[in-house]
Image (spheres, grey):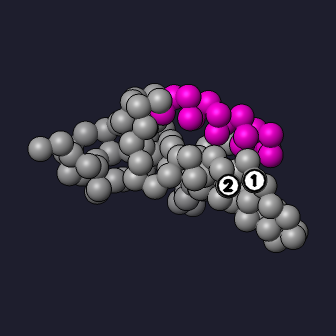
Amino acid sequence: MKCVHNQRCRYTDGFYCEDCNTYFGESSPTYRSGELLSSLWMVMHNINAEASREGGTITEAIEMRDKIGIRTKHENYEEIIAEAELIAKKYGKDAKSASFTLTKE
């Protein structure tokens, strides 16, 4: 049975799956086709949410968010990533804009 990686511990450079005891770095296909696309979905949502607070709508962000989808597997995920990154960059964002890192002092 193929692992769906539900039990994730996220790091700044990848994630560790507790289900299959495997670490997936940020350049791995598993990370890019899942975790990265999920982050870009959130970035698209946040771009539009910011515009919405100002009474606007960013149609290209909404369309990209819908294209990425939720729990959608894409054969062409690298193309979708490239397209989403261009939109994010246009609004001063990147995939890391979807989250923030907690640090201990």
Which residue lies at the image location 72% right of the left edge and 43% below the top edge?
Answer: 88
**Residue 70 visible within the image:** yes
Mark 1 → mark 2, Cα distance in angstroms: 5 Å
Q: State the SS at label 1.
A: helix
Q: Amino acid at mark 1?
A: Thr
10 or 48: nearer the eye?
Answer: 48
Q: Quadrant of the N terminus?
A: top left
Residue 100: % across, % down: 60, 56
User: Badges 1 and 2: C-beta atoms under 8 Å apart?
Assistant: yes
Q: In the drawing, does residue 39 fall left or right of residue 84?
A: left
Query: Magenta span covers which residues?
Result: 77-93
Magenta region, main secondary structure:
helix
Residue where numbered disc 2 is placed:
62
Which residue lies at the image location 65% right of the left edge and 34% below the top edge?
Answer: 83
Numbered label attached to residue 59: 1
Which residue lies at the image location 71% right of the left edge and 34% below the top edge?
Answer: 86
Q: Amino acid at mark 2?
A: Ile
Disc 2: CA contacts within 10 A as few (<14), some (14-19) or many (>=20) = some
Numbered marks: total: 2
Residue 44: % across, % down: 66, 52
Q: In the drawing, does residue 95 fall left or right of residue 49?
A: left
Disc 1: CA contacts within 10 A as few (<14), some (14-19) or many (>=20) = few
Numbered label attached to residue 41: none
Q: Is 38 placed above or below 26 here?
A: below
